[in-house]
Image (cartoon, rainbow, N blue to C red):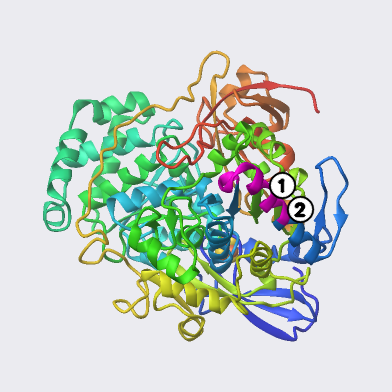
């Protein structure tokens, strides 16, 4: 516990780790936060917290923080400390030089789900108004972009449907490709409370996560599927629901498009989608598939929660639509205890998507080709906006290797560590003429940067985060920015240096602009957030205090639309050379690539990433628990220590990716979701061999 005496003040803010968005009081002494106390009135956490939010804030003042801007003319040169003015002017003149030489579309920006809504909004505005193109993307590209696509197509809004508290009304809970007790701990605890009260649980996951069996609860079904076969499982569940007469006909007739529903029924009823047929593909016994489908469909209230085990696949968007289809077919939408609930990994995944940091969408999920939307933003911003989508993150890398993309502004995202196929990403970064990294630490991406702009932690700035239940909460400054500028001020300075003036004096003014331009945010302001504590969007004239549960009475798109969900096997297949399938995840005490948690006491609890391997696979290869193993894929190879465990099924191995030296993303491939390019992190064919200690 980091507790250094009596606090002088207490600042209400929100955790900067996962998408639960727990409210905390940051207790401050001098210019340092000394304690984080979970806030009893927090809308998402009600006074609860996990180890990360409570204790893992020390990274904010870690000696590794870079607090002086730096530049260098080549990535082989040492960094040179410079003033803010010199660094910003250098970045701006390099961007303008590149555009003069290679064209307006030769530069772009990447923002992060770690950033506040206001910061993300400014990055996409900078790209669109100052760079003059739509080459802006967010790290949500590599996690929940299929959620945005799939839920928009089916339900009409790119967001989860419920509050977290809604789980307490669920009778049957389905958890697909998520590990809430580690990834979303406060919600995981709430979910377990509901299970202990008697709710039934279905887990769909290749790995035996803690939820499968715990003190005083046990999943009714654990569908331990082969990685990459989610859609096959969903189609088998749908087949059972349709062919056994378990559809909620009244709900579908009243709330959904009839023709699309009939087509879907015809498709899922085909024998090729039967549990018996899908058992072959998925490895899940047909009776378990049928039993799980019956349990969910016959629940009074059935709620689905899912994570990156759904989205990070070549059929990520298809699976999101398959989940929405199941919820519509059974009438499990539009009231407490039901719904389709994406568990967002980072603190502001929802917000970064809401704020238009996608190359095809302006804030509020409005396509850049929509003339009326463009006119609205052009009127406010005073510049023309392109009507063609810009480059997604993987397209930026390809364009860099082609020689047409030369400059990148990257705020808060370590693409060289977190994006798949590291060698490919590094080659793309090397090919650029100006990479500007804005971050707390000299991360892996900064190795390829020419300008480093110091970032600010969530404790050093004002703003808002939006959690997985669409809850907008205030982030409040508890200490001054260590580098003298908050992130939003850096983007403003860069825009001004580029000749596009931004004149905000406080992030509240940015939120006011967002509210003016975004129909789902028109009722949001800092004053209202102060008064209400937090607000779940949509918040507007129709929903002045926000919207805890969506699609009540009517879907956002009017009628719900069933979408086709044909199962297509991933290209990432096992063969003689790569006989095992690797999947990935994270643990409670660490967070994503570990940039923050590795710089706190939590590091000691999880000093390394390990490869989980089933005893049968380990025995075949002469691998004992704790041995070093080489893992090779079609993309690359790395070395980890083995953990021999029955948590994984034979033929499947698993690792976390919290430590850069583990090189998990050296081995992940370029395969991605067909609709959104979300990488297929969850399926990599690998070979595992015992090796000597490196
Ligand atoms: Fe932070 Fe998530 Fe833990 Fe809450 S559950 S304290 S938001 S990491």
Q: Which residues are magenta?
A: 93-106
Please report the residue visible at 48 percent of the width from the left and 74 percent of the height from the top: 513
Q: Position of residue 10 (x, y in %)?
A: 67, 83
Residue at horizontal 56 percent and vertical 23 percent from the top: 616
On screen, 242 above or below 54?
Answer: above
* Whether label 2 touches label 1, CB < 8 Å: yes
- Numbered marks: total: 2
Element at label 2: strand
Task: Locate residue 217, reporting x and y percent.
Answer: 43, 53
Residue carrying label 2: 451
Drawn side of residue 82 relative to residue 287, left or right:
right
Magenta segment includes 103? yes
Ligand 1 within 8 Å of the CB at mark 2: no
What residue sits 70% from the left and 79% below the top? 27
- Name which quarter of the figure residue 474 lies in: bottom right
Residue 31 in picture, x, y percent from top left: 79, 78
């Amino acid at each position: 516990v980091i507790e250094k005496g009596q606090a002088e003040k207490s600042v209400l803010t929100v955790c900067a780790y996962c998408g639960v968005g727990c409210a905390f009081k940051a207790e401050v002494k001098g210019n340092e936060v000394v304690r984080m106390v979970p806030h009893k009135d927090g809308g998402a956490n009600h006074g609860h917290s996990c180890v990360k939010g409570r204790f893992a804030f020390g990274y904010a003042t870690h000696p590794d923080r870079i607090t002086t801007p730096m530049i260098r003319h080549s990535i082989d040169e040492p960094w040179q400390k410079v003033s803010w003015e010199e660094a910003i002017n250098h970045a701006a003149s390099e961007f303008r030089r590149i555009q003069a030489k290679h064209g307006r579309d030769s530069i772009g920006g990447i923002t992060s789900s770690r950033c506040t809504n206001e910061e993300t909004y400014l990055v996409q505005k900078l790209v669109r108004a100052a760079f003059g193109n739509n080459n802006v993307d967010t790290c949500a590209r590599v996690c929940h972009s299929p959620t945005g696509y799939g839920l928009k197509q089916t339900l009409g809004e790119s967001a989860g449907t419920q509050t977290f508290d809604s789980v307490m009304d669920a009778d049957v809970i389905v958890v697909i490709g998520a590990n809430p007790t580690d990834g979303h701990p406060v919600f995981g605890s709430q979910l377990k409370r509901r299970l202990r009260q008697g709710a039934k649980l279905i887990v769909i996951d290749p790995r035996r996560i803690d939820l499968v069996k715990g003190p005083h609860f046990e999943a009714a079904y654990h569908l331990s599927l082969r990685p990459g076969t989610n859609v096959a499982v969903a189609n088998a569940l749908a087949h059972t629901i349709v062919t056994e007469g378990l559809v909620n006909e009244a709900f579908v007739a009243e709330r959904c498009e009839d023709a699309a529903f009939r087509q879907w029924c015809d498709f899922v009823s085909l024998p090729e989608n039967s549990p018996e047929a899908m058992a072959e593909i998925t490895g899940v016994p047909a009776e378990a598939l049928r039993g799980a489908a019956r349990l969910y469909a016959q629940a009074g209230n059935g709620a689905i929660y899912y994570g990156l085990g759904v989205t990070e696949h070549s059929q990520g968007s298809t699976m999101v639509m398959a989940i929405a289809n199941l919820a519509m077919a059974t009438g499990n939408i539009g009231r407490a205890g039901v719904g389709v609930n994406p568990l967002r990994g980072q603190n502001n995944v929802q917000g970064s998507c809401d704020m238009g940091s996608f190359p095809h969408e302006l804030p509020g999920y409005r396509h850049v080709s929509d003339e009326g939307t463009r006119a609205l933003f052009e009127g406010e911003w005073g510049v023309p906006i392109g009507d063609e989508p810009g480059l997604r993150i993987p397209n930026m890398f390809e364009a860099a290797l082609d020689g047409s993309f030369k400059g990148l502004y990257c705020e808060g995202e370590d693409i060289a560590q977190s994006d798949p196929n590291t060698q490919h990403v590094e080659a793309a970064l090397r090919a650029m003429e100006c990479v500007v990294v804005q971050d707390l630490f000299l991360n892996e991406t900064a190795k390829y940067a020419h300008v480093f702009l110091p970032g600010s932690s969530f404790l050093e700035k004002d703003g808002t985060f939006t959690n997985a239940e669409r809850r907008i909460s205030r982030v409040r400054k508890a200490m001054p920015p260590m580098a003298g500028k908050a992130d939003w001020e850096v983007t403003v300075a860069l825009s001004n240096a580029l000749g596009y003036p931004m004149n905000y004096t406080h992030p509240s003014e940015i939120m006011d602009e967002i509210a003016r331009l975004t129909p789902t945010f028109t009722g949001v302001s800092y004053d209202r957030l102060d008064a209400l504590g937090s607000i779940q969007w949509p918040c507007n004239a129709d929903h002045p205090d926000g919207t805890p549960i969506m699609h009540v009475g009517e879907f956002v798109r009017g009628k719900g639309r069933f979408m086709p969900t044909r199962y297509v096997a991933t290209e990432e297949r096992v063969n003689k050379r790569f006989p095992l399938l690797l999947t990935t995840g994270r643990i409670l005490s660490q967070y994503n690539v570990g940039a923050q948690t590795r710089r706190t006491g939590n590091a000691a609890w999880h000093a390394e990433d390990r490869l989980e391997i089933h005893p049968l696979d380990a025995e075949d290869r002469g691998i004992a628990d704790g041995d070093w193993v080489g893992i090779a894929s079609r993309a690359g190879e790395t070395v980890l220590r083995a953990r021999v465990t029955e948590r994984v099924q034979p033929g499947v191995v698993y690792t976390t990716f919290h430590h850069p030296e583990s090189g998990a993303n050296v081995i992940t491939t370029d395969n991605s979701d067909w609709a959104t390019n979300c990488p297929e992190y969850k399926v990599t064919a690998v070979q595992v061999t015992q090796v000597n200690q490196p």
